[in-house]
Image (spheres, grey):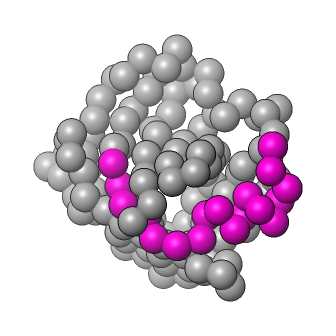
Amino acid sequence: MSGTEKSSAPRADWEAGLLGAWSLRSIRELGADGALLDEPYGQRPSGRLHYGPAHQMAVVILGQAAAPAVAYMGDYEADAAGVLRHIVRVGLPPFTEDQVRWARLDGDSLALSTDVEGRRRTELRWTRA
């Protein structure tokens, strides 16, 4: 999502769409041009993500040979522009600091990116569990 792109839904509706459990479908490293550079967790990564109604969150992703396991939980903040801040309360290293993600929510699909489109980034795709 570009830094200027806005969610078409009101903030409360957008945040409500996040609630619940999500299953990981892909983790892809993308170049600034959107070209696929790598799939560090393989073609079938395994993970779960949860957003709760009191702004709590938790994520677990199984590690692969060259990619670390991801496990942290805490709280989250969402803004109307689709930026999520995962406020890490406890996490496995190296995921012990807050994590910022650019989000695109489309029904039962959620894409979280480590940066905006037009820059090199890692993109995680989730489907509602």
Q: Give the magenta-colored segment's residue range.
A: 8-25
Which of the pair 121/47 is nearer the observer? 47
122 shown above or below 76: above
Query: Horizontally, is 35 left or right of 81 in the view?
Result: left
Q: Confirm whether residue 123 shows in the render.
A: yes
| Furthest residue toward bottom | 54
Tell me where residue 42 sits by quadrant: top left
Give the image location of residue 54, x and y in percent: 68, 85
Quarter of the picture holding the C terminus = bottom left
Quarter of the picture holding the N terminus = top right
11 shown above or below 106: below
| Furthest residue toward front | 107
Query: Horizontally, is 61 left or right of 5 in the view?
Result: left
Query: Horizontally, is 33 left or right of 64 in the view?
Result: right
30 shown above or below 97: above
Please give the name of the residue rendered at 51% of the width and 54% of the height, measured from the top-left corner: 108
Query: Horizontally, is 11 left or right of 124 in the view?
Result: right
Please give the name of the residue rendered at 35% of the width and 55% of the height, measured from the top-left corner: 24
Please give the name of the residue rendered at 82% of the width and 32% of the height, measured from the top-left corner: 4
Please give the name of the residue rendered at 21% of the width and 46% of the height, measured from the top-left corner: 44
